[in-house]
Image: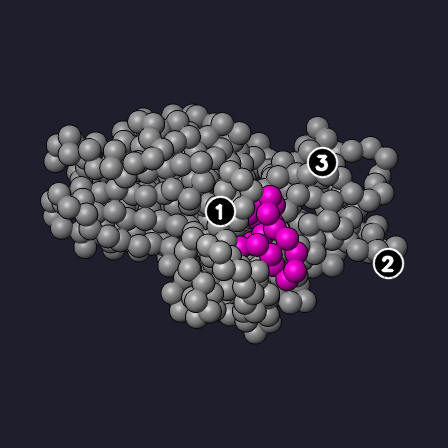
Amino acid sequence: MSGQDTFCPPRRIRRGVALTFVFASVLATGAATGSFGASGEQGGQDRESAAASGATPEGHREYVAKAAAEAMADGESPVEAAERAVSRSGDRWGAVYSEGEFEEFEEALDGAYTGVGLWARRETDGRIEITRVRDGSPAADAGIRKGDRLRSVDGEEIDGRPVTEVLSLLRGDDEDASAGTTVSLGLERGTRAWSETLRRARLSTDPVTVRRLTHGVTVIKVAAFTRGSGDRVRTALGQAPGDARIVLDLRGNSGGLVTEAVTTASAFLDGGLVATYDVNGAQRALHADPGGDTTRPLVALVDGGTMSAAELLTGALQDRGRAVVVGSRTFGKGSVQMPSRLPDGSVAELTVGHYRTPSGRGVDGQGLTPDLEADEGALERAETVLSGLGQ
């Protein structure tokens, strides 16, 4: 698994629950999707004798809110009580954020975050390798390079830890996560081992990038569906040469705002259904705007890091026959979360429903299967597919 030190929640409120790498996203309806994580160990004394497993979504919200209110009345931490309640509720994707964290996630949806500018992945031997360094970031200014090994963060050894946990260490706790605070890294390059102390900075993301390959292929990569990314895809498509064949690269896209995924779908579809979803049993639908480009040959690239809103988009393009999907099975995050404010201002984000592709396929827990399986050399396979598609 790989990741970037963006959108990682601080570790403070992850006691008793496995660390998660969460991209909060909110639909205009108030429902949210695009988060991912995992429920883990239950920690602390339960505030109620019975778990909320099997309860309705509305019951889950009441259960969590009650636990937080009782904790606040007893002078205890509402956030930790809510975490325990979420863990016991059986909600796989449920999460609790402090008020400050939720505000940071909202800012992240605008494409800004606080960090040092590193992407990393865990190798099969458990080592953490840096896979990319953002230009102009604190990490780049310190001379850190792609391929360097990250051995420790603030003195904590990190070999064998999940990448999400490592990135959370880079991000820092509530008290030290702001721009200007420092983080110490232990690094290794070949036989050289050294330490660097970096000062966190406010950085901006570039969620949509475009490059032109040979043979008239334009690659539009969408790293995440932050605000404005859908319009940027539409602009990139409009600026591509008239005879260009398009690769929409959604590999590693962890999701984001569903509205932006629908806008992206609208760039390639002439109206019609993008997805259906339910909120507390009420069925709703998402539709593309008319007028999209339906003629250019299109391949969508996906992998195990293609999640949530990116899966929703992939499913629409695949079901509607608009794109050939190439790559590996997607992650399988197809649930809808709704954020609820707790008495102390923190936020519980709980599952209220699931979305389906236009043909009625569920995504949650199973992902989407590409039309053509490809792991190594997926982009080359996409080019081959495009060469066989007529204008």
Does residue 239 appear left or right of residue 233 in this picture?
Answer: left
Which residue position is annotated with label 2? 75
At label 2, which amino acid type do we have? Gly
Residue segment shown in magenta: 150-167
Single out the mark in the foreground, 1 or 3: 1
Residue 324 placement: quadrant: top left
Asked if residue 197 shows in the view, the reply is yes
Q: Quadrant of the C terminus?
A: top left
Depicted 43 relative to depicted 184: above or below: above
Q: Secondary structure at mark 1?
A: strand
Asked if residue 107 shows in the view, the reply is no
Q: Secondary structure at mark 2?
A: loop
Residue 4 location in percent, x, y? 48, 53
Of marks 2 and 3, which one's residue comes earlier in the chain? 2
Depicted 300 relative to depicted 151: above or below: above
Q: 45 or 99, which is in the foreground? A: 45
Residue 188 location in percent, x, y? 51, 57
**Which residue sits at x=39%, y=45%?**
261
Which residue position is annotated with label 1? 121
Which residue position is annotated with label 3? 89
State yes or no: discs 1 and 3 in contact (Cβ < 8 Å): no
For residue 82: magenta?
no
**Which residue sits at x=59%, y=47%?**
159
Of marks 1 and 2, which one's residue comes earlier in the chain? 2
- Alpha carbon of mark 1 to alpha carbon of mark 2: how far? 40 Å
